[in-house]
Image (cartoon, rainbow, N blue to C red):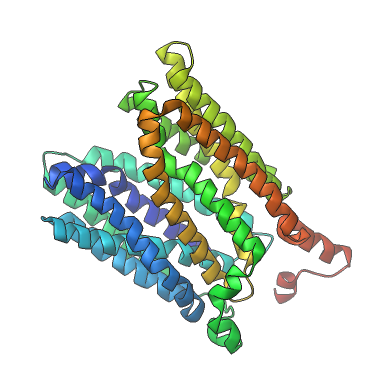
Amino acid sequence: MRRIHVGNALSAFGLGFTVPYLYVYVAQVRGLGSMTAGLVLAVFAVAALIVLPFAGRAIVRRGPLPVLLAALVSAALGSLSLGLAGNATAVLLAAAALGAGQAVMQPALATMIVDCSTADTRSRAFATQFFLQNLGLGVGGLIGGHLVDTTRVSSFTLLFAIEAAMFLVLVAVMATVRMPHSPRMEDAPAPSARGGWKQLLGNRAMVQLSVLGFVLFFACYGQFESGLSAFGVEAAGISTSALGTALAANTLMIVVAQFAVLKFVERRRRSRVIAAVGLIWAVAWVAAGYAGLGPGSQEMATAAFVSTYALFGLGEAMLSPTVAPLVADLAPEGMAGQYNSAFALVKQLALAVGPAVGGPMGASLHAPYIVTFLLFSLGITALALRLGRRLTEVQDQPWLRTSRVVARGEAPAESLAA
């Protein structure tokens, strides 16, 4: 588990070097224009949508570790090629390799965490993963910002080379991991192997969680760098430096609050924790609305806008130990890879649709934009409470599993194995 967490931190650190500067690199430094830069961002999403349905089956059949190693090699080659690419075709091909590799890493690492954790430790494991991801992205972006120089292509080539090196270091670290045996597709009966996706779609709780996940990612992550930032600039008059401060506030909130929040949510119903996040994000959208539409000075507007991103960070910290472990608990034995990949696919769809819808609305339809996403946040609360009625007691309150074992005077399985 320690190696997996080191891997998460390294991959996030590498991504932090390049993600904030990708548009500038393609459009301005390489001189390929905003159209090509926009296509590069679209290729990332399309590549993810293409590979994720196959990634889930591969993880179930082969295990998460071989799939992760293949994804890391693809991402490293894509990153290095992107730093060296000088024309639009080369840039788009490199972006496809990098995007596909990045997309597959998520469910592979999540499945490794599931296989290396127990029901008792899983929430803390996913919270640690999320904490390290944000810390790695923040530190990588900070260092990358000091290395980059828009007048020198070589400075961007260095950034992409560092990112590729981080992926290859992660290959070396992950190659030393010895995964515990968990059931694979070939261990399961033949009908289960043929009907993986049909079985998943027949799981009503998983379908409801996927719908809820789409709304979560659409109404939050899909707005960070598109609709919400456009609203801040156009309606609230937020400067680019203040926008950077808001993004930093989001990361800082996650890093500072993650483990304090974990103690709060560990013994509470998962469905109610997600419902509470919807209410917190509704307050965040009210703060954003005040920043752009309410009375007051520019300083008050800026403070309200920064608070919006901080409140989103608080909600994210509550979701990290809640949603991913719930996906794992809904998966039948040996199918965690398929379920993690399906949920990652839902996330990618939301991240593709979110900016397309929110960007134009945030830039021009200011009041409708705030009202729309305020309603989406309240919808999260309603969907979460509805999901809670579909979950079993142990799925919604995972600590009951241990409590009942102790109450019967039995030792937990992992203690007996030890």
Q: Nearer the viewer, residue 224 or 12?
A: 224
Q: Position of residue 417 (x, y in %)?
A: 71, 76
Q: At 38% from the left edge and 68% from the top edge, which residue is drawn?
A: 51
* Above or below 297: residue 42: below
Using the image, determine if residue 308 lies above or below residue 259: above
The image quarter containing residue 244 is top left
The answer to whether any part of residue 242 appears in the image is: no
Residue 313, image x, y percentages: 52, 38
In the rendered image, the residue lying farthest to the bottom is 190
Foreground of the two, 279 or 81: 279
- Give the image quarter of residue 389: bottom right
Q: Position of residue 226 (x, y in %)?
A: 37, 39
Q: Residue at x 72, y 58 (%)?
A: 390
Which quarter of the image is occupied by the C terminus?
bottom right
Q: Nearer the viewer, residue 10 or 289?
A: 289
Question: Which image quarter: residue 175?
Answer: bottom left
Tell me, yes or no, if residue 234 can be seen here. yes
Please indicate whether residue 272 sits to the left or right of residue 104 in the image. right
For residue 38, above or below residue 338: above
